[in-house]
């Protein structure tokens, strides 16, 4: 297993090297400039559209339902475990790069949502299919179809082997084990290793619940996530805010440490650039894992939204990055730093959810078990909805590859459930590294398309706001 982990780390370093960093940040910067910082100029309107559906829109689910499906896939272990992993591996500065990437990523996410609706296909019976595979093929031209196929292949891989299943259920099982059986007092032997009985039960229960929902398709997924996502996101934000306010005296120091670490200020002589690059790599990688800006996943959900206006759905789509990273991930990072959980993690070798659990346990004047329980519940619900969202994404990628063969999609759903079942029995480091690799491979064809079609995005945006200002359409 160590040899496999080392091999995956080598591949990960290649995939998430300087070229991809430049592509991600460069695409976000290009779109931000060409759209004249639209992500902040129109943020208020975007938040309004988020909860106000179009009266005459056409699609499978409401814009809010599509957003919740996308948020279900983004608000997950990346917000809780991913932030902690980034901080431990890349230093506190990873939080800075995560947020900066998200600021640019909002323009990227806006463009993805817009293009998804513009180039989507009506499959009949109220079904719409769209995403990077269609805006690559139809927007860039049929000669680019191999790039669209590559995206779909990587999308299936990400859903089945990385961000969609293994990392999420791994996070759930780790949280439940740490709460119910932290000392591994009740174990069973499986696959040549010892696992807590809590881990085994968690794997079975989560897999069963996933099967009950995903068999019902998008509408069932959207109905479930539209209830769970807002409730749990608000709960998690309230707890994080309470921790930050209670430790407010430490927040300025935490912010200074984050900024200094981001630029390698405290690194030994000659090591500043290296420290900065590590912080940037881990922050951007975990940020993309969390908010998926540039990954090409969210536009698959956006394409099903009940809307006639690509620009309007683009605005709704970009709010996902704002909520996910700029709000929730930032709060997690500040909670970890202001409570001293980062220093505890460095001293005791904590990783993953253990780091965030330390922050929740020590952050407020309550019994440590209370903080751990709240974190466990939040993580379980967040990760569960992410599993549901990524099933939908990877199914649509498979549908594109097979020309709409739903029999193959039906078989895939059970394979997906099986991947959830075995997820808790894989090592944490290998799982997260594999997820990073799949994310990076997905992002490459999608970012190429976003840069190539940036002129289309600008033209559509101008047309929409011109019509809005002249009263030809209602906002």
Image: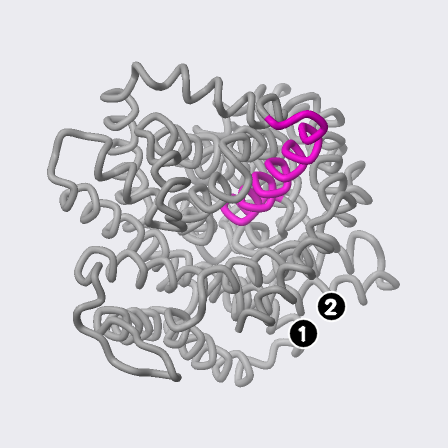
Q: Is residue 11 left or right of residue 369?
A: right
Residue stretch rendered in magenta on the structure: 267-293
At numbered mark 1, what does the secondary structure look like: helix, strand or loop?
Answer: helix
Residue 447: x and y, percent? 73, 47
Looking at the image, residue 303 lies above or below residue 233 = below
Which residue is under mark 2? 149
**Could you tell me which residue is drawn at 45 percent across and 39 percent down?**
324
Q: Is residue 410 above or below residue 41?
A: below
| Mark positioned earlier in the residue sequence (2 or 1) | 2
Q: Does the magenta portion include 275?
A: yes
Q: Main secondary structure of the magenta part?
A: helix
Can you give x and y, in whole percent of width and height, for residue 455 in the image?
A: 80, 36
In the picture, the disc for residue 401 is: 1
Residue 174, visible in the rendered structure: yes
Q: Residue at x 21, y 46 (%)?
A: 372
Up-down relation of residue 315 to residue 37 (above or below)? below
Is residue 40 rendered to the left or right of residue 21?
Answer: left
Left or right placement of residue 261 versus residue 271 in this view: left
Q: Are marks 2 and 1 in contact (CB under 8 Å)?
A: yes
Residue most toward the front? 269
* Residue sitting farthest toward the left: 367
The residues bearing labels 2 and 1 have C-alpha atoms spaced at a distance of 7 Å
């Amino acid at each position: 297993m160590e040899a496999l982990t080392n091999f995956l780390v080598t591949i990960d370093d290649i995939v998430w090297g300087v070229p991809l960093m430049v592509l991600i940040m460069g695409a976000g910067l290009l779109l931000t400039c060409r759209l004249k910082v639209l992500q902040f100029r129109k943020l208020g309107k975007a938040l309004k559209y988020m909860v106000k559906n179009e009266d005459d829109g056409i699609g499978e689910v409401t814009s809010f339902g599509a957003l919740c499906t996308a948020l279900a896939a983004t608000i997950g272990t990346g917000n809780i475990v991913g932030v902690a992993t980034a901080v431990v591996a890349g230093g506190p500065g990873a939080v800075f790069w995560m947020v900066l990437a998200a600021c640019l990523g909002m323009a990227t996410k806006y463009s993805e949502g817009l293009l998804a609706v513009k180039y989507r296909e009506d499959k009949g019976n109220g079904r719409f299919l769209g995403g990077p595979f269609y805006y690559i093929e139809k927007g860039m031209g049929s000669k680019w179809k191999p790039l669209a196929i590559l995206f779909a292949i990587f999308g299936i891989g990400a859903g089945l082997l990385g961000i969609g299943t293994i990392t999420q259920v791994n996070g759930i099982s780790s949280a439940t084990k740490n709460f119910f059986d932290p000392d591994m007092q009740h174990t069973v032997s499986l696959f040549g290793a010892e696992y807590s009985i809590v881990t085994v039960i968690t794997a079975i229960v989560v897999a069963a619940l996933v099967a009950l929902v995903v068999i019902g398709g998008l509408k069932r997924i959207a109905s479930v996530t539209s209830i769970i996502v807002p409730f749990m996101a608000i709960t998690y934000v309230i707890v994080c805010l309470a921790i930050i306010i209670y430790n407010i005296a430490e927040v300025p120091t935490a912010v200074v440490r984050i900024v200094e670490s981001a630029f390698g200020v405290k690194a030994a002589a000659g090591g500043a650039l290296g420290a900065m690059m590590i912080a940037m790599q881990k922050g951007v990688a975990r940020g993309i894992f969390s908010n998926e800006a540039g990954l090409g996943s969210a536009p698959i959900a956006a394409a099903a939204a009940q809307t006639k206006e690509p620009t309007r759905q683009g605005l709704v789509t970009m709010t996902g990055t704002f909520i996910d990273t700029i709000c929730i991930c930032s709060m997690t990072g500040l909670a970890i730093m202001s409570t001293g959980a980062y220093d505890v993690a460095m001293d005791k070798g904590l990783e993953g959810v253990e780091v965030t659990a330390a922050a929740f346990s020590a952050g407020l004047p309550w019994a440590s078990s209370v903080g751990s329980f709240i974190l466990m519940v939040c993580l379980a619900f967040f990760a569960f909805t992410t599993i549901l969202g990524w099933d939908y994404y990877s199914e649509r990628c498979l549908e594109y590859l097979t020309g709409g063969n739903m029999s193959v999609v039906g078989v895939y759903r059970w394979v997906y459930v099986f991947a959830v079942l075995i997820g808790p029995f894989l090592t944490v480091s290998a799982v997260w590294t594999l997820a990073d690799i799949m994310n990076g491979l997905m992002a490459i064809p999608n970012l190429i398309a976003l840069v190539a079609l940036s002129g289309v995005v600008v033209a559509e945006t101008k047309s929409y706001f011109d019509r809005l200002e002249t009263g030809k359409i209602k906002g």
